[in-house]
Amino acid sequence: MANTTVTGAKAIHGQNPQFLVETVIRNRIYESNYWKEHCFALTAETLIDKALELNCIGGVYGNQRPTEFMCLLLKLLQIQPEKEILIEYLRAEEFKYLRALAAIYIRMTFRAAEVYEILEPLLKDYRKLRMRNMAGYALTFIDEYIDSLLTEERVCDIILPRLIKRQVLEENRDIGPRKSRLLDALEGKSDKSRSRSRSRSRSVDKTRSKSRSSETRSRRLSGSPSGSRYLSRSRSRSRSGSVASFKSRSRSISPDRMEIEQ
């Protein structure tokens, strides 16, 4: 009874949800001590406590021993929690292994359009994950893990159900086009460069207008070159005329008059 699927569970991809895990791995999970001791009578709520204790993801390791991550995945397939509960698993950002567990379950059980809509936002998560495999421990990241769920056929040593390509879903209008963060970043840079170029052009125009206004002011103050020549000539002539008239007056005075004045 402990290995049977919960009563009233819906068939996934036309079969028992537990059958999504290969028979060999599933039998090894049933025989493992972790399954017998820690996964017995787990519910959607109590499973969270076990998921928080995880320190790695993976399928099998060593002598084909299943990881705790794989045991909890099979338990999720067995109890088949509601969709709202799985979404809450994903929203718990501080618990990355719980998020990874919910992500692979969603990839195996949800429709293709829902898989893309729910998992693609997780590509922004760049936190580290430990992966355990036959060779030992390895380091990966959540975005790489999500990308492998969306693109590869085998993840964590199990074969994933066939996933319709995103291009086909977009052509059938089942899902909208994907928004790339790289394009958004490039658009932001282009907008900044445009604003900088506009500000530079405005500053250049301002400097040019200032230089032109200063030139016109200097021209107005100095006047035309012909006017300045005319003024300088008139002043020299007036001075020379006054000197000549003074000399002529001094010469016209007779010496007799000068004696009388003395």
Image (spheres, helix red, strand yellow):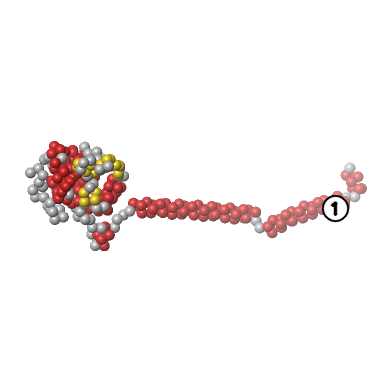
Left or right: residue 182 versus residue 35 is: right
Spot occupied by residue 88 in the image (x, y as percentages of width and height): 20, 45
Spot occupied by residue 13 in the image (x, y as percentages of width and height): 16, 55
Give the class, few, some or many, for how many residues have Cα within 10 Å of label 1's Cα (few <14, many ≥20).
few
- Residue underneath mark 1: 248
Q: Residue at x 43, y 54 (%)?
A: 194
Q: Residue at x 65, y 54 (%)?
A: 222
Q: Residue at x 21, y 41 (%)?
A: 63
Specify whether residue 207 is in view: yes
- The answer to whether residue 132 is above or below residue 234 is above
Quadrant of the image containing the N terminus: top left
Q: For residue 132, what is the image quadrant?
A: top left
Q: For residue 111, what is the image quadrant?
A: bottom left
Of all residues, the one furthest to the bottom in this rendering is: 171
Q: Amino acid at mark 1?
A: Ser
Residue closest to the eye, 163 or 209: 163
Left or right: residue 211 versus residue 60 is: right
Residue closest to the eye, 199 or 181: 181
Q: Secondary structure at mark 1?
A: helix
Of all residues, the one furthest to the front in this rendering is: 63
Spot occupied by residue 25 in the image (x, y as percentages of width and height): 17, 46
Residue closest to the eye, 113 or 165: 165
